[in-house]
Image (cartoon, grey):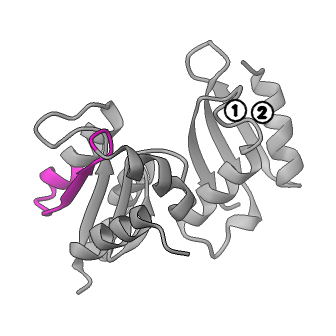
Amino acid sequence: MMNPEDVQKMLEKAFPGAWVSVEDMTGTGDHFEIVVTSKVFEGKSLIEQHQVVHAALASEMDKRIHAVKIKTRTP
Amino acid sequence: MSNPTIDKIQNEIQSHKVVLFVKGTPQAPQCGFSASTMALFQKMNVPFHSVDIIANPDIRATLPQVSNWPTFPQIFIDGKLVGGCDIVHEMHESGELQKLLKRD
């Protein structure tokens, strides 16, 4: 179980300057809906964009985080 | 590096234009995301080949490392990973999925 704020901090660290929003989907602190808006996604396919977000969370995936729903945007 | 499961995965993704690795079958999906993905392709009248990862635990264990994608379902078009449930729905809404499917 994790606070949405901690997930947000992980992502802000991984994507400096990005706009990040994290919502706890179930109230149980392990399913999050994540929106990341960052320039690093420019020129990447959707799958590549999601892969870099997964990579940023890899240390917690299947541990404190069970599932994420990801949306990526470019500014 | 020779690994029979990786060979099996390669054979599957090269056998059809659209390959879905899902939990369950089109008749009896075992997961809401798998069901919603198969329903999308059925609604679009796009034929697909589905592989039930519950019946194939070796593929379930190996595919995420091969594709660098942690979850199921996984959708492959022309032998390339396109995404999971969210991504194909988003690409369907934007028209990008239809473009990929039209390509010979």
Label 2 neighbour load within 10 Å: few <14, some 14-19, many 20+: many
Amino acid type assigned to the residue bearing label 2 in the image: Val
Q: Residue at x 36, y 75 (%)?
A: B79
Q: Residue at x 26, y 83 (%)?
A: B103
What is the secondary structure assignment of the residue under circle 1?
Answer: strand
Looking at this view, is B91 or A56 the one in front?
A: A56
**Residue that carries the numbered disc 1 in the rendered image:** A22
Outermost residue on the top side: it is A27
Circle on res. A7: 2
Closer to viewer: mark 1 or mark 2: 2
The N terminus of chain B sits in image quarter: bottom right
Can residue B95 be seen from the camera position used here?
A: no
Give the magenta-colored segment's residue range: B40-55
How far from the left and from the top, in percent, is residue A6? Answer: 83, 29
- Looking at the image, residue A34 sits to the left or right of residue A8; the answer is left
Q: Residue at x 30, y 41 (%)?
A: B34
